[in-house]
Image (cartoon, grey):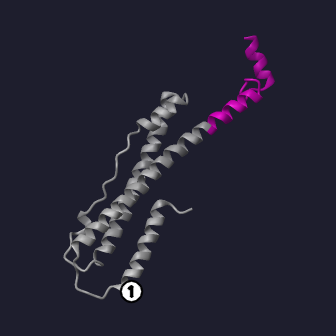
Amino acid sequence: MLSPEARIAAASQDLLARLDQLLPVSCPPRLPNPTTLSLVLPSFSNARVSSELERLGCSGAIVRALTKLFSAADAELRRTSHHYYERAMRRLAGAFEGDESLFLATQDALQCRFAGDYERAVAKTNDCLVTEVQAAMRAATATTTEEGGRGSFSDEVVAVLERA
């Protein structure tokens, strides 16, 4: 399955390929500079992931480490979203023959699309992180239960510890 960024890039590429064939060659449009049109993404708090990890019973150190990991993933998603949005806007800027209203409408549509894809990617990242923690906790519980609560200690070590 393609990532949201890859889907957006493919859709943008298809659109650009068709625009080349449909529009006559013209002089450069007088539109806003696409490099000044930056993507506005919603901000996410780490509170959601932190509270979910705390609800699962994770220690403070684990919550901090996984929240830091989540923040790094969020920063990468933001960087990637901005990169592909700005690239798409630069490529599309020449296709509007100076029609600023159409250009701005397209910008709004792309803004909504990229912001939505970013929100879904962040939610999926959060869900995957929590799912992995739950799986690890189940695996740890199953291992402890199968070994009679001894962890990975041998029978000899358990006997020594019980005598102590």
Q: How many marks?
A: 1
Would residue 146 be counted in the magenta stretch?
A: yes
Q: Locate residue 69, reporting x and y percent.
A: 47, 43
Q: Which residue is drawn at 39% across and 50% down?
A: 75
Q: Which of 54 and 68 is in front in this view?
A: 54
Q: Is residue 78 left or right of residue 121?
A: left
Magenta residue span: 135-164
Q: Is residue 56 left or right of residue 162?
A: left
Can you say whether 134 is above or below 18 in the image?
above
Q: Is residue 62 visible?
A: no
Q: Mark 1 points at which residue?
A: 21
Q: Residue at x 76, y 27 (%)?
A: 147
Location of the N terminus (image quadrant)? bottom right
Q: Residue at x 22, y 72 (%)?
A: 100
Q: Can residue 87 be seen in this view?
A: yes
Q: Locate residue 102, reporting x and y percent.
A: 27, 72
Task: Tell me the amino acid under the disc marked 1.
Answer: Gln
